Image: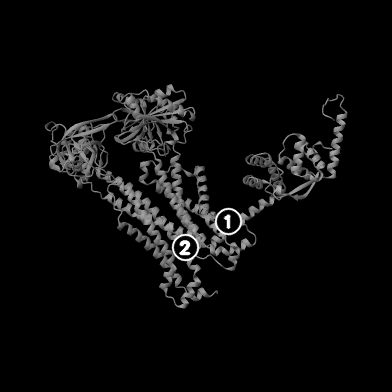
Amino acid sequence: MHPPKWSHALLKFFVKKRFWEEIEGDMEEVFQDNLENHSVKRANRMYFLEVLKLLRPIIIRKIEGTQKLNNYGMLKNNIKIAIRSLIKQKGYTAINILGLSTSMAISMLIIIFIIDQGRMDEHNPAADRIYRVITEFDDAARDRVTPFGTSPYEFNQTVQFNLDVVEDAAQIISGAGVVTYDNKSFGYSGLHVSSNFIDFFAFDLIKGDKKIALKDINAVVLSSELALKLFADQDALGQLIEINDLGTFKVTGIIDNKNLNSHMSFDLLLPRQVFTQQETNKVLLSDWEGGSKRFYNYFRLDNSTSAGLLLTYLNDLNSTFPVEKQALYAFNIQRLDNINLGRLIKNEIGITTPNIISYFFIVLALVLILSASFNYMNLSIARGLTRAKEVGIRKMIGAEKRQIIVQFLVEAQLVTFCSLVLAFISLQLLVPVFNNLSLLDDINGAITMNFNSSMSVYAAFLAFTVFVGLVSGAYPAYYLSSFNSLNVIKGLSNSGKSPRFLFRKFLVFCQYSFSIIFIITTIILYQQAKLFANADYGFNYENVVNVPMPNIPYKSFRAELLQRSEIKGVSAVSELPVLSNFKEVFLINRNAGENESKSSMFSIDPYALENLGLSTIAGRNFKANLQDDEVNAILINEKALDVMGFENAEEALNQTIEIKTKTEFGGSSTKNRIIGIVQHFDYQFSFRESGPLVMNYDPSKLNMINIKIEGAAKLQAFEAIENVWETFDTDTPLEFELYQSNIYAIDKEFEELVGIVGIVAFIAILISCLGQVSMIIHHIQLKVKEIGIRKVLGANLWQLMFKLSRGFLVIILIAIMLATPLAWKINMFWTSKVYTAPDVSIGNLSVGIGLILIMAFMTMFVIIRKAVRQNPVESLKYE
Amino acid sequence: MKKTKLGELEELVLLTVVVLNEEAYGVEIKKTLEEKLGETLSVGSIQSSLKRMEEKGFLTSAFGESTGKRGGKRKRIYSATPYAHSVLNELKDIRTGLWEAMTQPIISFISL
């Protein structure tokens, strides 16, 4: 029986070397004695305890002075040698640094993006004990639980006063409207907040006193952006502005909304009473369910451990609700600093970044780093043979394997640090470009940090660099240090068959596979972007201006507009096709019992079809006067025919069908008569499928007016609209948007996404090419003599080139064979989720493969040709 | 002489070394003392005392034989230097002097 291995190793670790024999011996003797009287386990434990008791000053080995000096000296030497060897191989070093720095720059960009996002709201000293109450709705229709950021209005008082652990509570009610100053009007989306808001969330006012800013009921705090729009260079503080029809408000503070660093975003802040004291709003206060509610409750607890108590209390509150609601709703809490980069929640106050986005970016960064690391590894190993003699000599004069590994690791770290410097410089340029992506506006994603003041970022970068250095350098270090010095000095080198050679080939294969997948994906994404840009939705939205329905009589407004020559048509709809979501209803298939199919529904006026360039293929349109037409008349589209079990349009005409709507509490159904069938048009953004559609004429639901204008005279048309508007309503400012530009805006985001993937693909491919170039160069250097001899013996150029490139060709072919199906699978996956998607066709795949092959061949060709043309006299001179 | 030259455990270990003569090595010293004191001692405490005394010049040591029980490792046999002997005697004299100077006898049931 031997003493326990680990304890023994521990002993040898800290005991002075000269004491080893006697102490080990004594320990073992005691151990054997113990075994006579105790169980093995017991004896092992006693041994371990004895080892611990050996930790005494006189027994523990010291890092003696000379040892310290030795390590320091070795390090200096290693660095010197590393620098020298890097300079000797300028070309390879440059390639490595280039590849590494590019991928590091992008990864660092992603790192700061994620750190930045993760830091939101962390400036608040109480961030770990402020909780928001959210409502979880058990959505039976979609069979999942949907969380909302809102919760009942009363909670603010109830929770605050009934739960001791609550120190303070803040409440926010969202709202939107129009703000006017000096005849300039802008729409805003803002928050009505409790008076402790600014302090509670640890915000700062750039102007104004935050202690009294929201005390008065007529006070308003503006965001710096809105203040700039309204007041330009003037001092906004103290000015009076008009808000909707609520009256006049005094600006008591300005808040910097660009540097809020919070999950919330808003244009202005109003005192909560402004909302609660309005008569029309009083009824809304008890209405907290569903998707469009706007009360947000935050509570600050005395301690983060009290969160459990809060949750329990909320569950208790839930049980005071009527039974049918209890099953549908549950209340949960979110900690303030976990709101951003957390769950995807509906009804968010600002725009938060859900965690899937950060995962996506992390994967992207990893791929790039791996690619560059592979390059480094490959290169180092390939050049290992040149370093072989060096390693051999070192070993002969007594270097331990460990020391040689350290040497190569130092070299790898040096390269990585150089790349870090380069990457850091590129980063300074990248950040502004990144922040300009409009893709980010949607997710409040612009990088707001100022890195010069954040230590944790520097620490993260440093750790990252060391990590990359280790990853890239570990394998080469291990491989290079294992050279057998005897063989090396003799001149024998590794043949091409050893497993290590295979590993390098594997690395090249990986890089090529990544590139293939990237290229193919980019090609398909590009086609997708083009499809979106050129999508024809089947109705006419060119030269159409959309205006939200004002509080004026629509019919007279319409009549006045039509009197102007620049106006070609006026109609109204409840929601805008393609830009908004329609209501969801269910249609019953009369041939299949109670089978229900989903359908969309929206309301139009009798002029919409014509105005938007649509026509009926059977039946008729709604009559101009609602009273003249039958109640519950509807129009359907062609797709609705199928799901309802009609053979054709004629069969469906004049039939009465049942339409069901479902709300949280059950549903309702109406009987409607089909008076016409409309030609198909795409009412969803081409991402999604436009399925069955039902249209009715319900004037109370019409929210948007479509005005078709004379394309050639747009400015005059706008003026005309303004003029007519003013004759009706001088208070509310006119807001309108071009239908076409809104649709284009969505495209732009998608284009940017394609752009990003494209760039990443380009970089990955660049890195692979660099890798390949260096591998080939090296390969050729090995074979210089062989080529020389073959030439002398009469081989022709082509034969030689083929022979040299054969190895690489095989790898590339294998990579193509394996990566293409993978690329196909990946692209099929996401295109299946998109309605109008390009085909993942052989054509596309071939283009991708073709590009890769061309690039591969070109690089190979150029290099090999150069090598092969070399004068054999030169290469054989030193024999 | 300075009282701080020898600690309590050190003195005991030193005495044991003298007693054990040629068998004076780590484990044996430990066993003897454990028996005499009636409590367990750790290898570490014995070793550290031995090493410290060797540094102070009270002990010399040399490698002895190896045994199977020790996994083939040799023992280190310690022996007291003349200097150690003189210090021990000095201490003994001081103690004896104090005991005899006691006017109130301490009744002890252990044989003196």
Q: Chain of mark 2?
A: A
Q: Chain of mark 1?
A: A
Does residue A678 appear in this view? Answer: yes
Per the image, the residue denoted by label 1 is A405
The amino acid marked with disc number 1 is Ile
Asked if both marks, 1 and 2, belong to the same chain, the answer given is: yes
Between A406 and B76, the one nearer to me in the picture: B76
Between A738 and B6, the one nearer to me in the picture: B6
Residue B94, quarter of the rendered image = top right
The figure's colour scheme reads one colour
The image position of residue A394, as x and y in percent, is: 62, 61
Per the image, the residue denoted by label 2 is A774
Q: Secondary structure at mark 2?
A: helix
The image position of residue A529, as x and y in percent, is: 30, 50
Q: Residue furthest left?
A: A628
Q: Earlier in the sequence, mark 1 or mark 2?
A: 1
The amino acid marked with disc number 2 is Ser
Residue at (37, 60) in percent of width and height: A852
Question: Crowding at label 1, few (<14), some or many (≥20) Cα neighbours within 10 Å?
Answer: many
